[in-house]
Amino acid sequence: MAQAGFDFIDLFAGIGGLRVGFENIGGRCVFTSEWNAFSQQTYKANFGDEHPIAGDITAIHEADIPAHDVLLAGFPCQPFSIAGVSKKNSLGRVHGFADETQGTLFFDVARIIAHHRPRAFLLENVKNLVSHDKGKTFEVIIRTLTEELGYEVHWRIVDARAWVPQHRERIFIVGFREPTTFDFDQLVRPKKHPTLADILHPEDGTETAEPHYTEGPEAKVSDRYTLTPKLWEYLQKYAAKHKAAGNGFGFGLFDGTGVARTLSARYYKDGSEVLIAQPGKNPRRLTPRECARLMGFDRPGSNKPFVIPVSDTQAYKQFGNAVAAPVAVSIAETMAPWLSNIVALKPAKRRTVGR
């Protein structure tokens, strides 16, 4: 991929899933904001200290953020309190984004876009953003980005399944200051879909042991990840209870041929959504290293594995909240043609495309 030569900022950065995609096409990160101290630790361990990581974005004035070409933000989903435009007009009140989104974290994204006018942005969120608050939240977001800020907007719910062995649906919202022919249908997906066998520890000596995840000459997964008899019994009873009631709640048990459920931030509690079968033993959780691979931050045998400097509990939370890195790479590559050249600042043709 040719060097794109652009600057970007990384808001609500987590452990850098979106950043991976835009560094891959030659972008340079000039500002990062992430409030969680443990996520900051992992982010610094993998991306260095080229600039300090800012904390609470709500306390940072937009003028203090460096100029940038692309804004990245995996902002949390929050409800909006929306009053009708006609009512606001009757009261002599403004009804732009500063009024409708004030008090939400999307407001901080919008005010930064309004001030810096980047040529493009990429926002990420859970797929339920579309239906949140009966669709009102998404309506305000799209209207703000198009009508208030004047960007061409495309959105799509993308399942990471094509890139990693995990069903993980997330909404991605792409915006451009100028008209483009960007299309989510152009995303390049691997010809071969991976399975869990591609990310699990082989446990046959072909992988170097990594304490405390694996041990011994064959790099067997440590017993600490095997469920205790008490926890395994509880999960089986819990699943049986809900199955009898006609509910779908329960654990997910997989072997190497399977595709995992969505890894969530609660994985540290019991690992129930992704358990790995072990012949003659209780099933086990994924190790944090396997979670790094499941999210596409790492590959087995990599010469430069993703650094995990935090406890297992924090690592599970971080990977469960992260953006699948290969999806970010594919979206960045598809956006790249419109990021490579400086374009004049003028109102874009407003267009919203999504499904």
Image (cartoon, grey):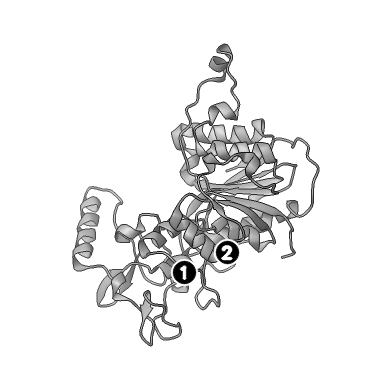
Residue drawn where x is 67% and y is 37% of the image: 115
Which SS class for mark 2?
A: loop
The picture quadrant where one finds residue 331 is bottom right
Q: Is residue 189 left or right of residue 249?
A: right
Q: Which of 327 and 98 is in front in this view?
A: 98
- In this figure, which residue is indicated by the disc labeled 1? 195
- The front one of 136 and 192 is 136
Q: Which mark is residue 324?
A: none
Instruction: Name the residue beneath numbered marker 2.
Output: 48
265 on left or right of 150? left
- The residue tagged with tag 1: helix, strand or loop? loop
Q: Which residue is drawn at 46% across and 61% down?
A: 166
Amino acid type, residue under disc 1 in the picture: Thr
x%, y% of residue 301?
51, 78
Residue 211 in sight: yes
Q: Which amino acid does label 2 sit on?
A: Gly
The residue mark sitting in front, 1 or 2, is: 2
Image position, residue 8 (x, y; %): 66, 52
* Residue 2 placement, left or right of 164: right
- Where is 32 relative to 149, above or below? below
What quarter of the picture does the N terminus occupy?
Answer: bottom right
The mark that comes first in sequence, 1 or 2, is 2
347 shown above or below 264: above
Name the residue: 46% across, 69% down.
195
Q: Residue 288's x, y, as percent?
A: 41, 67
Q: Residue 234 location in percent, x, y?
A: 20, 59
Q: Considering the image in quadrants, where does the C terminus appear?
A: top right
